[in-house]
Image (spheres, rainbow, N blue to C red):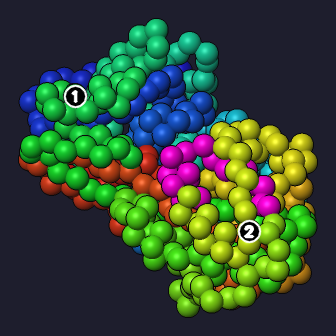
Amino acid sequence: MFNIFGFISSILIFLESLVPYPSYTHGLTGPVLYIDPIRAKSDSELQITNILYRKLFYFDTSGNLQKDLVADYQISEDGLEYTISLKNNATWSDGNRIGADDILYTASNLSYFQDIGIDKIGDFSIKFTLPNKYSPLLSILTFPVASSKDPITENKLVYPTSSDFKIIKAKRTASGVSEIFLFASNPSYNIRKLNFRIYDTDTKLETALKTGEINGFYSPRKFIWEGIKEDKIPLIGRYFVLHFNLESDVFSKKETRKLAVQSIDYQNIFSQTLSLPKTKVEGPISESLYTDKSLDFYTNKPDNTPLKSETKVKILALNLPEIKNYLENIQNSWNKINLLMEVEYLPQNKIIELNTQGAKYDAVIIGEEVGQDPDRYVFWHSTQKNGVGLNFSNISNIRVDKALEKGREELDFNKRSEHYQIFQQAIYEEAPAIFIYHPGVNLYYSSKISISRPLNIYYPFEILNNFKNWSF
């Protein structure tokens, strides 16, 4: 729908973008095929959409949920209906107002809403109806919203945006987006021009920073260059974990699992293989407001009695150099207690595929991804084992199940916290897994720039969340 006021506003913003304001160019690795909220999937694509699109809710730097497009909301007494009222003054870059149709359109295109009823009950209000109580709902209403007035089509690249940043120009080649130029209409930004340049290799990304073609980028690789600063960033939303298969003959007994866990010299492993930006995982709910800090998942007791006879352990593991280093470090410890490793290295998708097909393994190392809400149902509830969900430990424990179920039903923070304390304690006692580490990235940027980033970053696309306070 053509909007004359939006058209005039776009022209004025474009003309203002020609003023030589301070400009920051961020490098990303591609390909970047989509920069809309519905199709964006990779870290680089999400980095751009996170900057361009507003959400119903967002998490602040302390991990608390805050309203963005939402003016108010109500939850029914039975906890099954969430009625959301939107602010009626939020607009798209084309001048149209953001309304209920946009929320309905976006949510209906996201797979995790397939079992949730979504109804428009007014131009600026919408109702979500749940089949069962689900207290994490508000935390998943943090998705970027797309415009229903300009639906996503296969070949179109640029759509109306809703943040302070507007798209001035985007360049696309046969392999995807190569450059995108943004301008902040809000004059309170210290740096009003934010550009992205996309490269197909890390080497080209590094060269671009050396030559001044870009001002910064993030990467897991080590990079040293004169005039470049480094910020080491653990990614709290991702971690690696070794799951014992509780249905295998080797690890069906808790005593054997505890022996395996306590035989490892974690201090030695971490000193050799764990350095920032990596960081230790604090159990199944790590670096969270709900984390039980009293539990030590890395207890070492080298004098425990070993198994009576040598036992082979079949392990499926991610094919990553750091995982190989980790297993090499624990192999000597396990040899001393008569656990002998046989490791098969596979990509993550292959491990998941084998699990759904009923693969036989004694242990598996996999990467897991979580949000800021403490819900861990899909990873640990008994209904999610044997390939149904992501319960790779195949644990079936009443305390775990009940705590996870109650945690999903309770809205009060203190009461939810009690349930998740029980859950963490049960996991600690049952020892179904060894938590390895959170991976991380290094943010490299020009020493001329002063940055401000959130203290805890769950995913790489959050690195620019405080860009408003960056400055030269």
Corner quadrant of residue 163: top left
Which amino acid lies under the numbered mark 1 shown in the image of this protein?
Answer: Thr
Residue that badge 2 annotates: 339
In magenta, the rendered stretch is: 312-327
Counting from the top left corner in percent of width and height, residue 30 is at 44, 27
How far from the left and from the top, in percent, is residue 397? 87, 78
Question: How far separated are the C-alphas under marks 2 and 1?
Answer: 46 Å
Q: Is residue 148 visible?
A: yes
Q: In the image, is residue 34 part of the stretch drawn in magenta?
A: no
Residue extending furthest toward the top: 174
Q: Looking at the picture, does residue 403 appear above or below residue 59?
A: below
Name the residue nearer the viewer: 27 or 49. Answer: 27
Mark 2 neighbour class, 10 Å CA radius: few under 14, some 14 to 19, many 20 or more: many
Q: Are circles 2 and 1 on residues that touch, CB within 8 Å? A: no
The image quadrant of residue 218 is top left
250 vs 179: above or below: below
Q: Amino acid at mark 2?
A: Leu
Q: Which residue is rendered at x = 45% and y = 73% of the image?
A: 268
* Residue hosting label 1: 207
